[in-house]
Image (tube, rainbow, N blue to C red):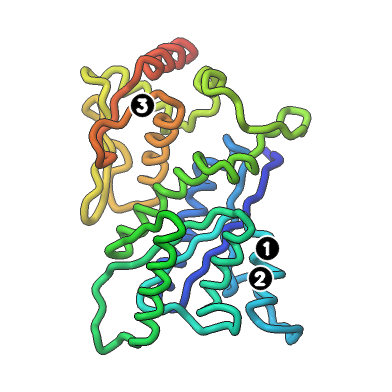
């Protein structure tokens, strides 16, 4: 069924030594769409100079990228490891210029730095030092995120993209709902209205909500380990195995229930969640409607 949606372009800014992470970011963005696009009437589209630029001799290369690609993007993802990139004449590299231009417009940027081991002989000392200096600059501007390897990046970015889309005021203003007549209205309903509308729950969220309500402690456990991950409640396991796309749907289910106030996190590691009074109430209403 066709539906109208708000499209949010996401710029991926990164030098050439993090190609795997760049591709993983694109995949995570598509995973977000798979889970959220229909219910939120929002679609994220990954954008980058390597996929959206075309040959043109009309001016300074980075200036063309900024004017024809970057300016239309509402969210930026920056990823760095040992290289910063080539200076542009205006900034230390194209990725740096994109990030600084983007945040100067008041738009959100998620910046990641790899702490993965690297062979010393493979490092360009000047590039590595430039990354260290830029990282220090970013730490003065706000919060950054680090990762140890590709699976760690995939896990963190998938989770933090959900948080950013649900929590950042700039992005929340962009997200719209479309009513039956195709008229846009702000997606800023009260939390009570959101909680009472079970149709906004994904299928996985509904399953977890109903199963957790039957669990003796009303508890949901999330485990991430080398080679896979799974979510467990009421003696049942969901999203088990190495299929990241499958697990992402169940991981989002926890995030959605948490955002709606149906779950509360126990501890500081994001591994244990418990139903709230509103969660039990929502489960009862959902069960009655089946």
Q: Which quadrant of the structure image shows residue 221?
A: top left
The front one of 179 and 188 is 188
The span from disc 2 to disc 3 (Cα, nearest Å) is: 41 Å
* Residue 7, percent from left and from top: 66, 49
Q: Which of the labelled discs sits on residue 263, or is there none? A: 3
Q: Which quadrant of the structure image shows residue 275?
A: top left
Q: Which residue is mark 1?
A: 71
Q: Residue at x 47, y 57 (%)?
A: 110
* Residue 185, percent from left and from top: 71, 31
Q: Residue at x 41, y 51 (%)?
A: 158
The front one of 14 and 7 is 14
Q: Which residue is mark 2?
A: 66
Q: Secondary structure at mark 1?
A: helix
Give whichever of discs 3 and 1 has the lower sequence position.
1
Give whichever of discs 1 and 2 has the lower sequence position.
2
* Residue 6, percent from left and from top: 67, 45
């Amino acid at each position: 069924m066709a539906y109208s949606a708000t499209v949010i372009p996401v710029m991926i800014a990164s030098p050439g030594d993090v190609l795997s992470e760049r591709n993983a970011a694109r995949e995570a963005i598509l995973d977000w769409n798979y889970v959220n696009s229909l219910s939120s009437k929002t679609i994220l589209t990954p954008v980058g100079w390597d996929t959206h630029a075309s040959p043109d001799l009309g001016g300074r290369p980075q200036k063309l990228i900024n004017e024809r690609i970057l300016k239309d993007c509402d969210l930026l993802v920056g990823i760095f490891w040992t290289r910063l990139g080539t200076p542009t004449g205006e900034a230390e590299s194209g990725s740096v210029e994109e990030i600084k231009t983007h945040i100067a417009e008041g738009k959100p940027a998620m910046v990641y730095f790899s702490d993965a081991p690297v062979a010393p002989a493979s490092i360009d000392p000047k590039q590595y030092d430039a990354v260290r200096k830029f990282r220090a600059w970013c730490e003065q501007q706000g919060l950054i995120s680090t990762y140890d390897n590709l699976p760690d990046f995939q896990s963190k970015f998938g989770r933090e993209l959900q948080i950013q889309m649900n929590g950042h005021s700039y992005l929340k203003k962009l997200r719209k709902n479309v009513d039956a007549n195709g008229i846009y209205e702000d997606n800023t309903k009260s939390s009570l209205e959101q909680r009472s509308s079970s149709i906004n729950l994904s299928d996985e969220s509904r399953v977890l909500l109903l199963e957790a309500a039957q669990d003796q402690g009303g508890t949901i456990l999330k485990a991430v380990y080398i080679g896979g991950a799974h979510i467990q409640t009421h003696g049942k396991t969901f999203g088990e195995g190495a299929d990241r796309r499958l697990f992402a749907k169940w991981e989002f289910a926890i995030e959605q229930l948490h955002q709606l106030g149906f779950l509360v996190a126990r501890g500081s590691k994001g591994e244990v969640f418990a139903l709230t009074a509103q969660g039990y109430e929502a489960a009862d209403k959902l069960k009655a409607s089946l």
